[in-house]
Image: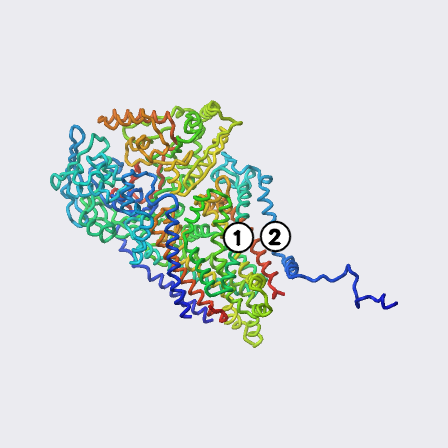
Amino acid sequence: MTIATLPDRPFSVPPEEAIRGRSLWADAWRRLLRNRAAVVSAIVLALIALACFGASWISPYPIDDIDWENISTGPSALHWFGTDENGRDLFTRILYGGQVSLMVGIVATLVSLMIGVAWGAVAGYFGGRIDSVMMRTVDILYSLPYMFFVILLVVFFGRNILLIFVALGAVQWLDMARIVRGQTLSLKRKEFIEAAHASGVSTVNVIRRHIIPNTLGPVVVYITLTVPSVILTESFISFLGLGVQEPQTSWGVLIAEGARVMETAPWSLIYPAIFLGVTLFCFNFIGDGLRDALDPKDR
Amino acid sequence: MRISKMMATLGTAALLGLASAASLTGPAAAETVIHRGNGAEPESLDPHKLTGVPEANILYDLSEGLLVLSPKAEPAPGVAESWDISDDGTTYTFHLRQNAKWSNGDPVTAEDFVYSLRRAVDPATASDYAPILGVIKNAEPIIAGEEKDLAKLGVEAIDPQTLKITLNSSTPYFLGLLTHSISWPVHKATVEKFGDQWTRPGNSVTNGPYTITEWTPQSRIVLTKNPNFWDAANVKIDKVVWYPIDDLAEEFKRFRAGELDVTSVVPSDQIPWIRKNLAKQYHNVPYLGTYYYVVNLTKEPLGSDLKLRQALALAIDRKILVEKITQAGQLPAYSWVPPGIPGYEPAQTSDAKMSQAERNEMAKKLLAEAGYGPDKPLNVEILYNTNENHRKIAIAIAGMWKKTLGVNAAITNQEWKVYLDTRDKKQFELVRAAWIGDYADASNFLDLFLSTAGERNDAGYNNPKFDELMKKASVTANPQERNKILHDAEQVFLNDLPIIPIYHYTNNYLVADKVQGWVDNVLGYQLTRYLSVAG
Amino acid sequence: MLRFAVKRAFGAIPTLLLIIAITFFMMRLAPGGPFDKERKVTAEVEANLRRAYHLDEPLWMQFGRYLGKLLQGDFGPSFQYKDFSVNELIWNGFDVSWRLGLSAMILAFCIGVTIGSIAALRQNSGVDYATMGLAMTGIAVPNFVVAPILTLVFGLYLSWLPVGGWGDGDLQHAILPITALALPQIAVIARLTRGSMIEVLRSNFVRTARAKGLPERIAVSRHAVKAAMLPVVSYLGPWTANIITGSVIIEQIFGIPGTGRYFVTAALNRDYTLVLGVVIFYGAIIIVLNLLVDLIYGWLDPKVRYD
């Protein structure tokens, strides 16, 4: 063996077994997969979503089909979940309704998340006058009468399905901003932020990489509160003429109708409520799992 | 620890504070009380400013006009004991009771009525219903602001017990009109002293069987017997409490729990159960009103094609609608004016006596003749204001049109004020509507569609023959002749089908067994003075 | 701190003015007015109505007139309830709403924080899953389902409590509404507390307290809980404002004469003065409560400073 043929690194390893470094996200992903509740929830949620968006293949009836012989009847072989007061199959309506509710729940929540987190973090981090102006703006928007806002949306933009997301997201981000701001106020004095400062990290990156990830705890919890709130608010605004129009429906609307007739037609309330409940539980466990997975201190 | 202790203290304090907010409980049980559901918080208890049924219910207990409603809802002597009508029917002379008194002891005089009627037509009062008094001489110019002198109104106090009213022309239903609150008296000194607050307990002075002793908005209104009422001896209930409950299911629960003796409505989904289990307490009474869809005659294709309108009207299976969807015993409607007006026979559409199969056949034929069919489907839009019943009916009708005619009906809802605005601006194709009679006369329904009716004529109906017949009726003195002319006018109207009549209303309420003296009537008013509570 | 509070108080005035102005003009843009009814009034009567309420004046004039009256503390007459002024309606309503709301808030806070803390201390155990599952149910079931069920079970079937109404404002009429108001909030507060506590329990200062030998009970209650309250307080600020001004649904179902229903019905009826009245009232409460929340932040986390 000559010097030229000595291996260039001590204890060198064949290339295919080289150790790959683990990123934070890979770490978190692995932890998430180990959380059984979260995984089961994700599967259940996926199944529900598949059923809802595949409603046109799965459901035995079209959404507006009226069975004149079976008006407001309970579960039977013909109608697994019973029929509503107009004789329409409830199973079908729950599936189609899920399309709206799931979309609304996810999209509106994402919208409120993005705006709210950014707003709150910036306000809390900079403090002083910027904080003052930003949070006073939140106060003003919070105090304005929501009903008129929705009515005017319809008046000016017509009956656009996209408007639902605007109407719903527009209010949810306010609470989110407040929570994130509170967290930021507490966080910005912590040592690791000072360390980031000291090592010359830019302000944008301090906010983006240090503040925001550390507010995720309450944010994730709050998201699991926003989703049901959004779904139920959607039923309220369809009362105002915005949102889903007959024969389209949503879980919020179905539950509101069911609550009205809960004594005479309990199935109208129970089945949509079960679907909504299970979905929310799934979001909840996934959310908890996410928070546990992303928390660096959780070993 | 400290935190939770603080919480406990705060918590107890809050609950104590809550409990101390309670006033002392009411007087001893020797007096009779009746609890009545009323559906909505009244907008005002000023007889010249109120517009709705909840307000009228309460006011019938507080005030009395020249005439009053009998238990059968017919005009009966009120403050006026008797009256003379001139031969040409334009002058009424009322003789007031000697013992009619206000709740503070003042006598009720003809001067009170003169003041009140002038106040009703005064533009400054801005009264919604003032135009009803338009039959009185000079009322219309005063309301319009053209005549500034209120004294020109055709009412005169000959002496404290005699009131003379002069009309523009003979008006057979004038006496019935006087049972409407717009013509009732208000106490001048009270109104002038307290202004807008005169109706409040402590300020209010009224001349009816009860006075108002408590008004908690959104909670309850308590009326107590007026000892100065001329007929106080026959008023058997000491206290009536009116509850403005707008949630139907909750009102029904409170009735079942015994907290209410009378409800204002009944939730329609409970009606089958009620018919079986509360049959004796359930009252299902024809009500003077019609539920219908207005066709926008300025919009194509429905506006110009009578065949299309007829096809749509024929294809509605009203029987199934009232039996399975609304379930409240309503009457399928083939006329505009509902039945129940004494002396008036409503006109009918030609399909009134057909079977539904026959109607469907005819509908398909008419649709094809109009040029529509499976390859050219008709698309229409139904507008309604957000409400459970309207929604169910619209869905059902759309379903029927689809099944029988292949028509695609889009259904949209709007919130109340936006809906009214859309109707005014005629931006709809078909819109859901309802009309409840103000008083028992066919003209109250037919007048809506005069070409001169302005915004009230939301179909945009304009038929000179119809206008002509209505005008002729308004100057006919003989009631039978007049009703016949009105019938002919209605027939002309129905032949043009600017509206699609759907059903005639019923009133549904629950009355507890212990309430006696209850008489169902077509106007839906049961004055507390005629009732009594057993046990 | 005092300087901070005073500065905020002054900042409240332009905030409120903006709220008033935006709301005023927003309302006028919406179709329909307070006097539109299904029974159309004749043109003359409509003109009379508009004149009586100054609706025939140019908008900027009406706005100025409104502000002038406002400075004297007069919110104007209600357009819908003609025999009452807005001041009276809000005052009488709030007298009821705040009692119900505050009781519900205190109840929800005490129970929620306790449950959330216990769940956090026993993270991922059976107790944790059970309580959080229950909490999730409380959040998933809307109040317009819970409230009628409560009246049905406790009012009708068991007859323990009145089905509805406010009666004389006594306790038995208040129990069910307070419960219905508190239940969903117990759930929310429990979840927020748990989430926050889990993070705090791992923090250095709690570790230090334990290392120093403090009994777990004191370490948790005196140190951990306080620090964990931050997100709960952030949420409580606006939510307290909501609950003491009343919940529409609860008030409608139980027949409570509070201010909550005005937020919806006044807008639906286009009762301009009443809408402005409740909006201003609500805005003022929000501003005050947010100030309170910020002050509490300072107490909870001594590091929080307002520059």
* Residue marked by disc 1: A111
Left or right side of A165 for A29: right
Q: Is residue C273 above or below residue B457?
A: below
Left or right side of B130 for A51: right
Q: Is residue B347 above or below residue A239?
A: above
Secondary-structure class at tag 2: helix
Viewer-nearest residue: A212 or C257 = A212
* Residue marked by disc 2: A42
In this view, the residue farthest toward the left is B159
Secondary-structure class at tag 1: helix
Amino acid of disc 2? Ala
Left or right side of C296 for B510: left
Q: Earlier in the sequence, mark 1 or mark 2?
A: 2
What percent of the width, then of the height, locates residue C151?
42, 51
Count of marks placed on residues: 2
Per the rendering, the mark at residue A129 is none
What percent of the width, then of the height, locates residue B302?
43, 29
Instruction: Tell me the mark number nearer the camera, choosing from 1 and 2.
Output: 1
Q: Are marks 1 and 2 in contact (CB under 8 Å)?
A: no
